[in-house]
Amino acid sequence: MFPGFGTLVNVVFVLLGSFFGLKGARFINPKLREGVIHGIGLFTLILGVKLLVENKPETLKVFFILLIGTAVGYLLNIEGKIEELSDTGKDFTNAFVTSSVLFTVGPMTLLGCILEGTKGDSSLILSKATMDGFSSIILASSLGKGVAFSALFVLLFQGGITLLAFFFGEFLDPQAMANSLFIGGGVMVVIAFKLWGLLKDVKSVNLLVPLVASLFI
């Protein structure tokens, strides 16, 4: 197997799961869909708090990464550009960001990509891909087609980590990973509140910039 094989399988599973989820959405009662979204919000909040508690970040560095990264995201108007891709606007971006973060933030993603990049072992990332495939069915049926587009973020984020591990595995900094997981936990908390209809003015897509940047700084 080649570096990135597990990520490519992950992308395919997310796309397939999203396809089946979107096809089945018409059979879901709107009240049930709303309840599922609230449940996803609670699950996201629990995961986010767990990451915040478990990881010890470099506080000052994380502050500047968030400050500068979010500012760059706003200046580039990333969320606005993504909203232009769809006529559903904010619903599309909420689906995209929620699924992107759920699929890529966590120890399983980092460890799986590093194992594949350094040792050629795709088993962990393939296990994650299977879980993401089933999760994308539920997410797409409740949140919409933005879930399918999160496959692109999965490809870039996981593929980038795998290639980084493949070429520079011995230079990967465990503290940078802890910083990334901590920031990811914070982003998850924000997303949870947005799924509950709160923090509507926060442009969560722009928060993905510091999440990615934290791995390389």
Image (tube, helix red, strand yellow):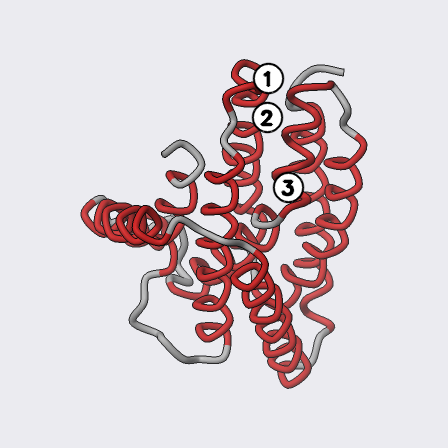
Look at the numbered discs 3 and 2 and tell me whether their residues touch, using CB distance below 8 Å. Answer: no
Q: Which amino acid lies under the numbered mark 1 shown in the image of this protein?
A: Phe
Q: For the C terminus, which image quadrant?
A: top left
Q: Which amino acid lies under the numbered mark 2 shown in the image of this protein?
A: Thr
Q: Which residue is mark 3?
A: 109
How far apart are labels 1 and 3 at the CA level? 15 Å
Instruction: Give percent across and percent down for residue 50.
Output: 60, 64
Look at the numbered discs 1 and 2 and tell me whether their residues touch, using CB distance below 8 Å. Answer: yes
Residue reaching furthest to the left: 75
Q: Is residue 86 above or below residue 159?
A: below
The mark found on residue 166 in the picture is 1
The mark found on residue 162 in the picture is 2
Say which element carries label 1: helix
Residue found 52% across the figure and 62% down from its top: 52
Residue found 45% across the figure and 62% down from its top: 186
Q: For the N terminus, which image quadrant?
A: top right
How far apart are labels 3 and 2 at the CA level? 10 Å
**Disc with the residue nearer the chain's start (1 vs 3):** 3
Callout 2 crowding tier (Cα within 10 Å): few <14, some 14–19, many ≥20: many
Look at the numbered discs 1 and 3 and tell me whether their residues touch, using CB distance below 8 Å. Answer: no
- Looking at the image, residue 108 sits to the left or right of residue 170; the answer is right
Q: Nearer the viewer, residue 98 or 120?
A: 120
Instruction: Give percent across and percent down for residue 164.
Output: 52, 22
